[in-house]
Amino acid sequence: MVKKLKGMRDILPNSIKMWQFVEEKARETFEKYGINEIRLPIIEKSELFLRGVGEETDIVQKEMYVFKDKSDRDVALRPELTAGVVRAYIENGMESMSSPLKLYYIGNAYRYENVQKGRDREFSQIGIEFFGSSSYETDVEVILAGINFFKNLNITDFTLKINSIGSTESRKNYIEKLKNYVEPNLNEYCKDCQTRFEKNALRLLDCKQEKCKKLNENAPKITDYLDTESREDFENLKKALTDLEIRYEIDTNLVRGLDYYNKTVFEFVSNKYNIALGGGGRYDKLVSSLGGKETPAVGFGIGELRLIELCISEQENQEFEEKLDLFIANIGENTKIEAIKLAEKLRSKGFKVETDLMNRSLKSQLKYADKKNARYSTTIGENELLSKKIQIKNMENGDIKQVDIDKIENEIC
Ligand code: HAM
């Protein structure tokens, strides 16, 4: 048989409830902030990500699924959604809409990574992007929307980590200082860091290898080199979060893996697994660098798989089991369609109802009803059709009641 590709995922009916639950909570949370949904293509021109995410990032260099289409165009499966949202924002004239323009998305992304718990090659991101406002209050609202999303999912075991990486100019100045610090010991850093030193030195701070972390212990801190505006915004952000009683940690090594950020960056990090559940920040230059007008923007992306694998599936008392309101069993050939008719009537009133489609014996039909967690069951036979009365069984406590067929809904609501 042909099997699926490594790192791709079949989401089967027995776990789909969790995914639907997370997605419903996302919609519910974000719509309260006046954020509207956007859906975009999974495949884009590769150039979008080279220019958007950054040519020297690991995502573009090592992880992107790129190929030629039938017309010899270089295309890529999106490794993240922000660049596509920005493309759509410019291409669809959303720049002229009133600001801030607030968008959210739920969609798959693809990265050729080492597969492990919480990390797949196909994964879904839930994210928001706000366009048109450069105020630190917007950063605050974006972070709040993330925090409230977690709250609505009953996820509390995470830390909000924040940092500011300043403007392009201040960062350039800082990178020089960082390189001066690293250079004398460059040979002791890992191979990846030696490459980063040449191509993307800021990412030296992000290395997960213990020896590199140790070497970086006394490195200059980016927050000591911020331009005035970034420093003020960062101070205001910290103050606002404190005012709002949002706990945070400053992590001056937090630089994120994508090149488009400036000023505020942040991550929601799982305490138990020490892995980012989500992350984001400000990207004030991305719209203009992809051909739009100068437009400040900020947003985040959260990994749905990480929420589910690392948090939701471990929650106690969380009910994801499917429940059927009523199972209608039937006895006798003539009652099958009557059972379907009754089921249709109740479905149109909002109940979840199933009937037998397998020609099973009555005993097996009721066994099936039990398996499907039916709250009630009933059996239609010739007698019931004639008398227009039916017995309803409460499957939880076994109580049986005789009711008019036309009034079943009063019994099962
Ligand atoms: P990112 O940090 O690369 O940011 O990804 C966001 C989240 O997606 C991660 O924190 C993680 O939960 C999830 N994720 C990433 N890679 C994988 C993977 N291989 N398997 C499972 N989950 C994964 C971005 O993508 C930015 N676009 C976020 C953003 C939006 N910044 C501003 N706006």
Image (cartoon, grey):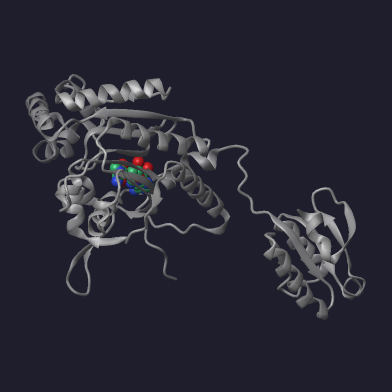
Q: Is residue 361 above or below residue 98?
A: below
Q: Is any part of residue 190 visible from this angle?
A: no
> Of 296 and 290, which appears nearest the observer?
296
Q: Quadrant of residue 316?
A: top right
Residue occupying image coordinates x 7% and y 25%: 180
Q: Is residue 401 above or below residue 22?
A: below
Residue 37 is situated, as x and y percent measured from the top left of the image, at: 40, 53
Quadrant containing the N terminus in the rendered view: bottom left
Could you tell whether 412 is left or right of 95 in the image?
Answer: right
Where residue 262 appears, as percent x and y from the top left, is: 20, 36
In the image, what residue occupies the spot 39% across and 45% down? Answer: 303
Left or right: 154 in relation to 302: right
Horizontal side of 110 relative to 212 (left or right) equals right
User: Is residue 341 found left or right of 380 in the rendered image?
Assistant: left
Q: Between residue 137 and residue 383, name the one nearer to us.
A: 137
Which residue is located at x 62 percent, y 44 percent? 319
Query: Residue lying farthest bottom?
Result: 334
Q: Quadrant of ligand 1?
A: top left
